[in-house]
Each structure stands twice: as structure tokens, then as C-alpha cells.
Image (cartoon, rainbow, N blue to C red):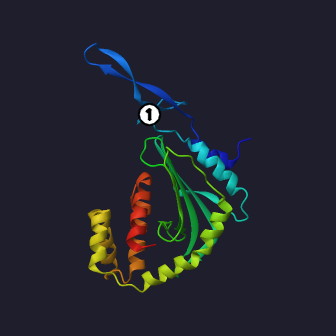
Amino acid sequence: MTTELEKRLSPYLFPVMEREVFHSDIQNKSPLLTRDYKAIVRKDTGELISIMNDTYKIVPNSEVIKPLMEQLNMLDTSWFIDSSHSYVESNRMRLQVTFPELIFSDGRSDVSLSLFLHNSYDGSEGVRMFWGAIRAICKNGMIFGQVLSKFYSKHTAGINIGNLNQQVEATYEKIPVIKHRIEQLLNEKVNDAIRMSIENKLGKKVMKYVEEQEDERNQKAKNMWVLYNFLTYFISHNVQQRMRAGYQLEVSRLFKL
């Protein structure tokens, strides 16, 4: 019998394979085999996902998700696959795991720690695992790239999920550091420099959204934490799933969180 978890993970675990690449010979009008590239293909549908150079090594989603599930099942704390920031496409995927018991408060809402696992078959990113959080009242996704550890492996190297239990414990122990940084943001006024950085790094559309939120409230963002939550709300509700991580990482850098 298929469990609910297996059903949730099934779309991520499609089989992939490598195929030879041929190119047309203009002079002889016949296909020629190239050893410099390989095709990455979905085995179940035959869909061509990408053309990669010959040094590229496939790391199937199953090879990172299944070991992660094994590690999660050994934890003492509860967890669930969180659909709010998870997605899967043929070329890329992001899987969010949220820990509802590992929480802290920002003064208005409970915030649960989350883990974000990434992989791709088109070279857009290697296997990556980020620690972040999800805000209860609005499902704002956050990445704490500056204050929490992150894992990265290129496809040309081996991968190792590591001892997740130790990572969870170490991450939870850093909650006071996160809360301290939030307190700093609560006491830090918004200046023109950060507004300019937001527009330069995230785009005019994002800055326009911030200004619209301020107009609705008839006041400028009263501190950096308010501004931060304007941005995480916009990203979580107005940016396509496959693009959210890039925005979240940029906000993490901008706010040193």
C-alpha cells in the first residue's frame, strides 16, 4: 500500500538517464556523434531535459531525497513535507521540510524552522540544502543563509546529507542568534540605502510593492523587520516557485539574516 508520504514524494522521483548527442554535419548532411556533450532524458516519458557537457554527473532526486527521508525518520522531533514552498519540474526541484515543534516567535507569529532541499538536471544549481523558516500567520518563507549553516555540492562531486540529527540540533541551538538579529532589525530604522539596494538587487517591481504596502498603511515601514516581512510576503505569494529561492537568498544577504 502506498503511504501518503510516498504519494507526496512520487512526482520528485521520476527516473532519468543519459543519452548520446548527435549533431548535423552541414557538409555531409548526416548526424555525427559528439563525445563532448550528453543528453539528460526522463526515462518515464522520454522528455529531453537538458544537454550537458560530458563532465556533468547526474545526481537523481531519489539519491538526495531518500537518504534525507531516512535521516528524518530517525529524528525525535516531528516534521512534514511542506507544500508552501516545494515544487518539482523536470529540470529542477525544491523540497521543503518543516519542523512544527522547532519554533520561535517574532512577537506577532510563531516561526517554524524549515529545511529546503534543491536539485537540478540542467546545471542551474547543484544539490543544495538551506535552513530557513516559515511564518505561521502568512506562510512567509525565509532563508537564514547568514546565521545558519548551509550545504552545497556541485554535480561533479559526491554528496553527503550528513547526520541530520546533529544538524537539526545545531540549528535549533542557533535560534537565540536568529532572535537577536530580529531584535536588531526591530530597532533599526529603514534608510534610503536599503531601499536603493532592494530596487537594485530585487527589482523595481518589488520596491513598488513595498511602497504600495506603505501607502495602504499611511506610513513608511517603521523598522527593518517590517520591511523584511513585506519582502518575504511578496516573494512567498507573488514570485514563481522556481524563482523564490534566489530572491530569498538575496533578502538574507541584504538583511544579514
On the rendered image, what quadrant is the N terminus found in? top right
Vertical comparison of 127 with 29: above or below: below
Question: Compared with residue 223, is residue 102 higher up or lower down, i.e. above or below?
Answer: above
Label 1: few (<14), some or many (≥20) within 10 Å?
few
Find numbered disc 1 in the image and state the secondary structure of the residue it sits on.
Answer: loop
Query: Is residue 8 in view?
Result: no
- From the viewer's perspective, is residue 24 above or below residue 144? above
Residue bearing mark 1: 54
Q: Which residue is drawn at 63% across and 64% down?
A: 167
Q: In the image, is residue 235 above or below residue 160?
A: below
Quarter of the figure with residue 72: bottom right
**Residue 45 screen position, x and y as percent:** 51, 30
Indicate the amino acid at tag 1: Asp
Residue drawn at the location 39% of the way across and 58% of the way down:
239
Q: Where is residue 111 in the image (x, y as percent from the top left)?
A: 56, 72
Picture residue at 29% right of the left edge, 63% below the top: 203
Q: Where does the image place residue 17, in percent across and percent down from the top left? A: 53, 31
Task: Say whether residue 172 is visible.
Answer: yes
Measuring 29% from the left and 14% from the top, which residue is drawn there? 29
Task: State which quadrant residue 236 falls in.
Answer: bottom left
Q: Position of residue 251 (x, y in %)?
A: 40, 67
Q: Quadrant of residue 232?
A: bottom left
Tell whether 189 sits left or right of 48.
Answer: left
